[in-house]
């Protein structure tokens, strides 16, 4: 994973999702205990995809047709005073469909809270590992994520494809940065896996000595006129 800044709420969400959702919850006590919340968010699916730049919050790869995901799921808040979270923009994330469908009530790290230094994508294995920077109170959620995604064939297949296409020159580093940001970061942290042109471009330029002048070398240069 990586850190994600909370995106701005799309225009119309307050009126068409939050207000209507609260009204539905208050219409009947049965609504707060319903098996499923009334779906008012799917009409904003395109806005959610755009808000998160088409990047799954959990696999951190390009997913053009993912799901609107509730970080705190309905199953956890139904029948409680927090049922309104089903309609709160700050509870919305973007996820690959299979993750959203299989996550259930399993708690993953919140991408709004995660810091980039918590995770390290290893090369060339492409396995995601937690670092010692993970705060203890977040470790259980981090382990949940790793158990679900670390060696999942869908995740690994996607990472391998991006890695292979980059190494074969089919996909530039700039596009890897855009569509598979964790891999882009790992490549930059492990320059041995960069293509020669990228390595040369990203290598720090050694400082050049200042140009010498005649004043730096007394006695050199043309003799004074006699």
Image: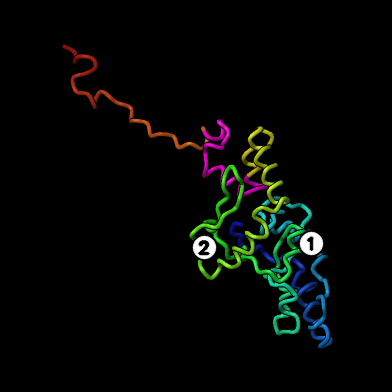
Image quadrant in which you'd find residue 27:
bottom right
Residue 218 in percent (x, y) is at 19, 23
Q: Which residue is mark 2?
A: 134
Residue 210 in percent (x, y) is at 33, 30
Residue 58 in percent (x, y) is at 66, 58
Q: Secondary structure at mark 1?
A: helix
Which residues, given as a range, are shown in magenta? 177-199
Mark 2 crowd level (few <14, some 14–19, many ≥20, 10 Å Cα): some
Camera-side residue of 114 and 12: 114
Instruction: Indicate the colouring scheme.
Output: rainbow
Q: Secondary structure at mark 2?
A: loop
Camera-side residue of 157 and 83: 157
The residue sitting at 59% across, 63% down in the picture is 142
Task: Say if the magenta span includes residue 183.
Answer: yes
The residue sitting at 66% across, 32% down in the picture is 168
Camera-side residue of 167 and 11: 167
Task: Say if the magenta span includes residue 180.
Answer: yes
What is the residue that sits farthest to the top in this orientation?
A: 226
Of circles 1 and 2, the one toward us is: 2
C-alpha gap between disc 1 and disc 2 = 32 Å
Q: Residue 45: which numbered mark, if any? A: 1
Height in image: 193 above or below 31?
above
């Amino acid at each position: 994973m990586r850190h994600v800044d909370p995106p701005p709420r799309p225009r119309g969400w307050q009126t068409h999702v939050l207000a209507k959702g609260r009204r539905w919850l208050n219409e009947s006590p049965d609504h707060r205990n319903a098996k499923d919340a009334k779906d008012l968010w799917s009409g904003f699916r395109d806005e959610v995809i755009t808000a998160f730049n088409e990047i799954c919050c959990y696999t951190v790869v390009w997913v053009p047709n993912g799901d609107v995901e509730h970080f705190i799921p309905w199953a956890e808040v139904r029948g409680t005073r927090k049922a309104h979270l089903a309609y709160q923009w700050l509870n919305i994330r973007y996820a690959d469909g299979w993750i959203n469908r299989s996550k259930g009530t399993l708690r993953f790290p919140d991408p709004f809270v995660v810091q980039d230094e918590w995770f390290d994508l290893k090369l060339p294995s492409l396995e995601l590992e937690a670092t010692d920077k993970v705060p203890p109170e977040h470790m259980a959620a981090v382990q949940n994520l790793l158990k679900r995604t670390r060696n999942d064939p869908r995740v690994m297949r996607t990472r391998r494809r991006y890695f292979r296409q980059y190494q074969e020159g089919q996909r530039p580093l700039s596009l890897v940065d855009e569509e598979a940001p964790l891999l882009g970061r790992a490549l930059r942290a492990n320059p041995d896996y960069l293509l020669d042109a990228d390595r040369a471009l990203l290598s720090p330029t050694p400082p050049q000595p200042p140009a010498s002048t005649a004043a730096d070398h007394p006695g050199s240069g043309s003799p004074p006129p006699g």
